[in-house]
């Protein structure tokens, strides 16, 4: 029986694309992507969903009104896991309660460092020599849920802000695919924070 995945995102969708490619080439374990949901009608993530012939839904999101609509869409897909991949919103209590232990997020820093928006820019400005990305369980604390796994990225003297960001994206794609694969075959279990 497949391990059903729903992906929620806002932007270009490169992390969703990495998951879709891994599923199509058989390297996503038991995972099957059942739908992709975005809060932006013109997002690249929805284009990737259509390119891979997956259910693609746009729905505006706000913490006050968005939870009910998102709950309805996600419940209709009945996923075993909801992956926040570039979702640029703070999820509300309805989603947190309904999907506790089944909701993960990918963040472009080594948490707990550089939480929130523009983590890559924060790390670059701060001048760290090592950064990376984190997949974590989602809870009510911004980027505060228990870490599932991390991947490090070295910043060299030759790096520019753009090359550093490109390295982070490569690490994100590998890490997210690996974590979803391991979740799908039961190698990772939920750890509340």
Image: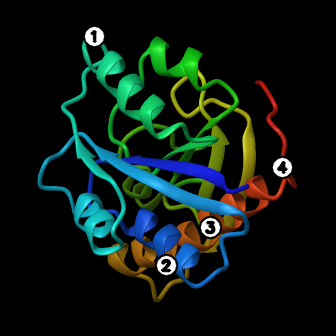
Does the image show residue 140?
A: no
Whether 191 is drawn above or below 104: the answer is above
Quarter where residue 181 is shown = bottom right
Q: Which residue is mark 1?
A: 64
The residue furthest front is 1
| The disc label shown at residue 21, or none | 2
**Foreground: disc 2 or disc 4:** 2
Residue 57 is left or right of residue 35, and the answer is left
Look at the numbered discs 4 and 3 and tell me whether their residues touch, using CB distance below 8 Å: no
Q: Which residue is mark 3?
A: 177
Spatial distance from mark 1 to mark 4, Cα to Cα? 32 Å
- Quadrant the N terminus occupies: bottom right
Residue in the foreground of this view, choosing between 29 and 77: 77
Residue 9 pos. (x, y %): 35, 48
Residue 116 pos. (x, y %): 43, 37
Residue 134 pos. (x, y %): 63, 53
| The disc label shown at residue 188, or none | 4
Spatial distance from mark 2 to mark 1, Cα to Cα? 34 Å
Q: Earlier in the sequence, mark 2 or mark 3?
A: 2
The residue carrying pointer 4 sits among few (fewer than 14), some (14 to 19) or many (20 or more) residues within 10 Å by Cα, namely: some
Spatial distance from mark 2 to mark 3, Cα to Cα? 9 Å
Residue in the foreground of this view, choosing between 182 and 26: 26
Whether 172 is drawn above or below 92: the answer is below
**Foreground: disc 2 or disc 3:** 2
The residue carrying pointer 1 sits among few (fewer than 14), some (14 to 19) or many (20 or more) residues within 10 Å by Cα, namely: few
Q: Earlier in the sequence, mark 1 or mark 4?
A: 1
Say how many tags the image has: 4
């Amino acid at each position: 029986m497949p391990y059903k995945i729903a992906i929620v995102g806002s932007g270009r969708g490169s992390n969703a694309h990495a998951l879709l490619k891994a599923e199509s080439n058989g390297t996503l374990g038991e995972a099957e992507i059942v739908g992709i949901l975005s809060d932006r009608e013109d997002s690249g993530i929805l284009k990737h969903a259509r390119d891979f012939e997956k259910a693609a839904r746009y729905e505006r999101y706000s913490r006050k009104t968005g939870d009910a609509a998102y709950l309805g869409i996600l419940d209709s897909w009945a996923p075993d896991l909801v992956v926040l991949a570039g979702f640029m919103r703070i999820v509300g209590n309805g989603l947190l309660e309904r999907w506790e232990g089944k909701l993960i997020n990918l963040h472009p820093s080594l948490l707990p460092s550089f939480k929130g928006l523009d983590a890559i820019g924060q790390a670059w400005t701060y001048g760290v020599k090592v950064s990376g990305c984190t997949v974590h369980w989602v809870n009510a604390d911004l980027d505060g849920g228990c870490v599932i796994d991390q991947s490090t990225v070295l910043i060299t003297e030759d790096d520019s802000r753009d090359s550093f960001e490109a390295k982070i994206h490569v690490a994100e794609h590998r890490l997210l695919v690996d974590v979803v694969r391991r979740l799908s075959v039961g190698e990772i279990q939920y750890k509340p924070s």
